Image (cartoon, rainbow, N blue to C red):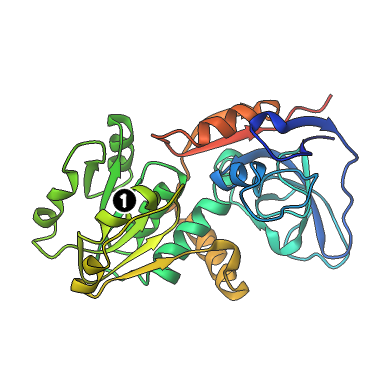
C-alpha cells in the first residue's frame, strides 16, 4: 500500500509518499481500507517536532473513515465490509490502509459520507470534551465560540445547539459567518472588526457570556476574561504562542480558565463521547462540514492550508486509488 512517511521533523516537505507492506491484524485489531483521511492542526505540530519526542519514522494522522477489510481474533464490535470512522490508529492515518485497535473503530450510518466520517475524530471529540466534560455547559447558558468556522468550532456549535445553549460565534470572513449562521448560531461577530466584543453586553443583557470555547488563546484570552459573566469559564482548546492576561479581570468575576487535553481524557469519558457521536449521527444533529479535499500525495499542501486563518470546516485527504 501507499502511505505518507515522515523520517525527519521539519516543514511540510518532509512528508513523502512511499510504498510499504499492508498491515495485518492481530487479536483485537482491525484493518480498515481508507476512503478519506482527516487533517488536523495537531498533525502539523507533530510533523514540525513541536509535540514532544514523537518517534521517527512515522505515518501522520489520527482521523479517517473507510471500510473494514480484515478483523483479528476476538473482534466483535465491527465486521468485515462495515463502514467506520477512526479515532486514532496504531499505524497512522495518512495511508491507503490503517491498523487499529478495536476500540479506535466506530460504525457510521449510511447517511454519513466517508469524507464526513474523516471529520469526526479529533474535532467532535475535542469539541464535546471542551464543552461538556471540561466546560460543564448547561442548557440556557450563553456560549461564545471564538473562531467558530473551523472544524472544531463547527463541531462545538452543533453540540451546543443540541444542548440548548445560546451561541455567539465569531469568524473572519463573510463566507465563514454565513456558514455558522446556517448551522444555527444565534449571533455572529466578525473578529476582524475593531471592537467586535463590545457587542457582547447588548447581546447578553449586560451579563456577559457564561462559557467561552477558545480556539486561539494567544490572540484572545486576555479579551475573553473581560466579557465573561460572573462565574464564567473559558476552555482553552488551541493556541499558537504565548498569551497575556490581567489576573484582575478573572478575579473581579470569579471566572476560571480551563485547559483541555484530548489525549489525556480518561477512557470512560472517551467512551461517552463516542456514544454521543453515534447518537448525533443517527439523529442528524451533528453534520460534519468538509470544505476541501486533496489527494493523499498532496498532504504537504493540506498541512499548509490547515494552518491558514479563515478555515471553513474540515480538510480531508483522499487516498491514492489501487493500481
Above or below 255: residue 196 = above
Q: Residue at x 42, y 36 (%)?
A: 311
Can the viewer see residue 199 in this picture?
yes
Above or below 277: residue 69 = above
Query: Residue at label 1?
Result: 220
Q: Residue at x 58, y 51 (%)?
A: 109
Residue 80 screen position, x and y as percent: 79, 51
- Dividing the picture into quarters, in which one does residue 130 lie? bottom left
Q: Quadrant of the C terminus?
A: top right
Residue 210 screen position, x and y as percent: 24, 66
Above or below 9: residue 302 = above
Above or below 284: residue 3 = above
Q: Residue at x 32, y 42 (%)?
A: 180
Q: SS at mark 1?
A: helix
Can the viewer see residue 140 in this picture?
no
Q: Residue at x 59, y 27 (%)?
A: 301
Amino acid at each position: 500500500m501507499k502511505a505518507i512517511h515522515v523520517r525527519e521533523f521539519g516543514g511540510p516537505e518532509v512528508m513523502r509518499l512511499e510504498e510499504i507492506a499492508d498491515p495485518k491484524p492481530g487479536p483485537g485489531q482491525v484493518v480498515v481500507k481508507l476512503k478519506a483521511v482527516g487533517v488536523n492542526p495537531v498533525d502539523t505540530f507533530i510533523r514540525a517536532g513541536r509535540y514532544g519526542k514523537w518517534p521517527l519514522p512515522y505515518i501522520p494522522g489520527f482521523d479517517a473513515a473507510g471500510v473494514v477489510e480484515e478483523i483479528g481474533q476476538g473482534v466483535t464490535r465491527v465486521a468485515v465490509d462495515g463502514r467506520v470512522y477512526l479515532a486514532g490508529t496504531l499505524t497512522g492515518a495518512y495511508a491507503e490502509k490503517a491498523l487499529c485497535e478495536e476500540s479506535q473503530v466506530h460504525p457510521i450510518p449510511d447517511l454519513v459520507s466517508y469524507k464526513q466520517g474523516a471529520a469526526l475524530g479529533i474535532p467532535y471529540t475535542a469539541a464535546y470534551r471542551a464543552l461538556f466534560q471540561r466546560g460543564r455547559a448547561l442548557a440556557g447558558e450563553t456560549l461564545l465560540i471564538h473562531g467558530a468556522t473551523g472544524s472544531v468550532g463547527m463541531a462545538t456549535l452543533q453540540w451546543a445547539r443540541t444542548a440548548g445553549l445560546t451561541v455567539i460565534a465569531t469568524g473572519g470572513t463573510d463566507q465563514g459567518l454565513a456558514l455558522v449562521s446556517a448551522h444555527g448560531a444565534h449571533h455572529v461577530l466578525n473578529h476582524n472588526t475593531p471592537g467586535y466584543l463590545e457587542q457582547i453586553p447588548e447581546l447578553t443583557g449586560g451579563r456577559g457570556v457564561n462559557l467561552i470555547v477558545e480556539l486561539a488563546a494567544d490572540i484572545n484570552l486576555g479579551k475573553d476574561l473581560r466579557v465573561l459573566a460572573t462565574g464564567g469559564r473559558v476552555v482553552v482548546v488551541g493556541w499558537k504562542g504565548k498569551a497575556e492576561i490581567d489576573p484582575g479581570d478573572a478575579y473581579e468575576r470569579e471566572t476560571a480558565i480551563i485547559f483541555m487535553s484530548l489525549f489525556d481524557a480518561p477512557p470512560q469519558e472517551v467512551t461517552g463521547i463516542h456514544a454521543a457521536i453515534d447518537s448525533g449521527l443517527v439523529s442528524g444533529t451533528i453534520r460534519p462540514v468538509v470544505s476541501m479535499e486533496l489527494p493523499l500525495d498532496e498532504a504537504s499542501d493540506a498541512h499548509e492550508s490547515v494552518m491558514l486563518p479563515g478555515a471553513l470546516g474540515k480538510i480531508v485527504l483522499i487516498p491514492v486509488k489501487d493500481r
